[in-house]
Image (tube, rainbow, N blue to C red):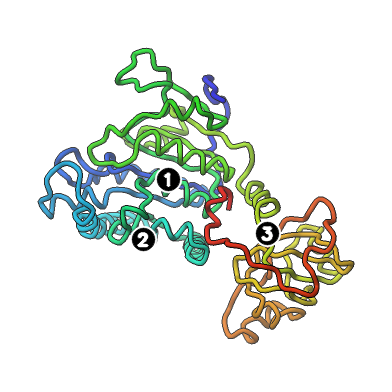
Amino acid sequence: MVGRKALRTATPLASARRIVVKVGSALLVEGDSGRLNRTWLKALLADLLRLRRRGQQVLLVSSGAVALGRRPLDLTPGPLRLPESQAAAAVGQIRLAHAYKELLEEAGVTVAQVLLTLEDSEQRTRYLNARATLEALLKVGALPVINENDTVATAELRYGDNDRLAARVAQMTSADCLVLLSDVEGLFTADPNRDPKACFVERVLQITPEIEAMAGRASSTHGSGGMATKIAAARFALSAGCHMCIASGHPRHPLRRIESGARCTWFIPASTPLAARKQWIAGTLRPAGALHIDAGALRALRSGKSLLPAGVTRTLGRFDSGDTVSVIAPDGAEVARGIAAYSDDDAARILGRQSSEIESLLGFRGPDELIHRDDLVILPHERGPALPETAAPAVPDQSGPALSGAV
């Protein structure tokens, strides 16, 4: 579904709690010189710092490593072979990271470099580790700068562009808003360079075959993504309850311009990130095990609280941290479902105990909750006993939690 009327309320960028901003190579690199466009980058970082000052959390997905590494290695223009691309990334990434560190630390902001591969969002353990790292960085006030790990990613395992990587990061972190800054100002009904009748699309409510047909090819000499990759990113973002914007990043202060009404395309989700995540937990995952709780814990869950070890009476089945488990009431009915913060072995050692005792019992400091309320869904009706008492459940393949589209 497409809307052509301008948004008349404050942009999702202004109201978002957590924002992912993606910057394309064509914006960071000055034309054919292969040099970093520091003037433009300073203006962008000023925008990011303004968002942080008003209490919003920001993650930056930055292309540019390969483009910045070509000139020092004297690589000729045009497509690179995979080993050449990896070599250029190795050289360019250190230059890119240094620029971010220098400019952000001038403003008193700690910058963190995070390099991801496709496997980091599709292999469950690595996905959970990456998500925990990003959450920890945001909690302590650092600004994560994320890029694909081009130096080790193979042709078969690459995201292929940072549009889709940014959408994966938005999913991973339950971001409210994703902004793709590029060398195009948004989505057109056709390629405006070829079709003078092409119309600009200001709002998209659903990714339909009509929308997908509007995608064109990449026009940048530096970037690897085109409109098709942005539409693919929008599909991921919308399924995760995240607003997404495609906007031109060429003018200085591009985020401020978006909030001031500059022309861009907004993709509007049907739900919030938390609602999409809970729908995914409730409806698309088979439990790997179960936690039995007492009456006090049941009352706490129904009042919107997390599940603490003190209210758990026993565990059932084999599960790891990050697996989905059923929550079983004293009468044997499945009353909730959530993502366990501990494995079944660790859960068994801390059940019935206070959260303050976890570190002494396990030898490490973990979460206070067995299931955090953001990872827990109260089921709308009783489903009866969720798991047989006599056999441990089969553990399903949950190697790719991000593939569900809402995590």
| Residue 271 image position (x, y, % from top left) | 64, 40
> Horizontally, is 40 left or right of 344 in the view?
left
| Residue 105 image position (x, y, % from top left) | 33, 59
Q: Are marks 3 and 1 in contact (CB under 8 Å)?
A: no
Residue at 76% from the left image edge and 57% from the top image edge: 304
> How far separated are the C-alphas under marks 1 and 2?
18 Å
Disc 2 crowd rating (10 Å Cα; few below 14, some 14-19, many 20+) is some
| Residue 65 image position (x, y, % from top left) | 26, 52
Disc 3 crowd rating (10 Å Cα; few below 14, some 14-19, many 20+) is some
Residue at 38% from the left image edge and 50% from the top image edge: 159
Q: Is residue 264 above or below residue 117?
A: above
- In the picture, the quarter occupied by the N terminus is top right
Q: Nearer the viewer, mark 3 or mark 1?
A: 3
Residue 116, picture quadrant? bottom left
For label 1, the SS is helix
For label 2, the SS is strand
Q: Earlier in the sequence, mark 3 or mark 1?
A: 1
> Horizontally, is 281 left or right of 292 in the view?
left
Q: Which residue is mark 2?
A: 113
Amino acid carrying label 2: it is: Gln
Q: Which residue is mark 1?
A: 164
| Residue 275 image position (x, y, % from top left) | 66, 47
Q: Nearer the viewer, mark 1 or mark 2?
A: 1
Amino acid carrying label 3: it is: Arg
> How far separated are the C-alphas under marks 3 and 1?
27 Å
Q: Is residue 111 visible?
A: no
Q: Which residue is mark 3?
A: 286
Residue at 30% from the left image edge and 42% from the top image edge: 224
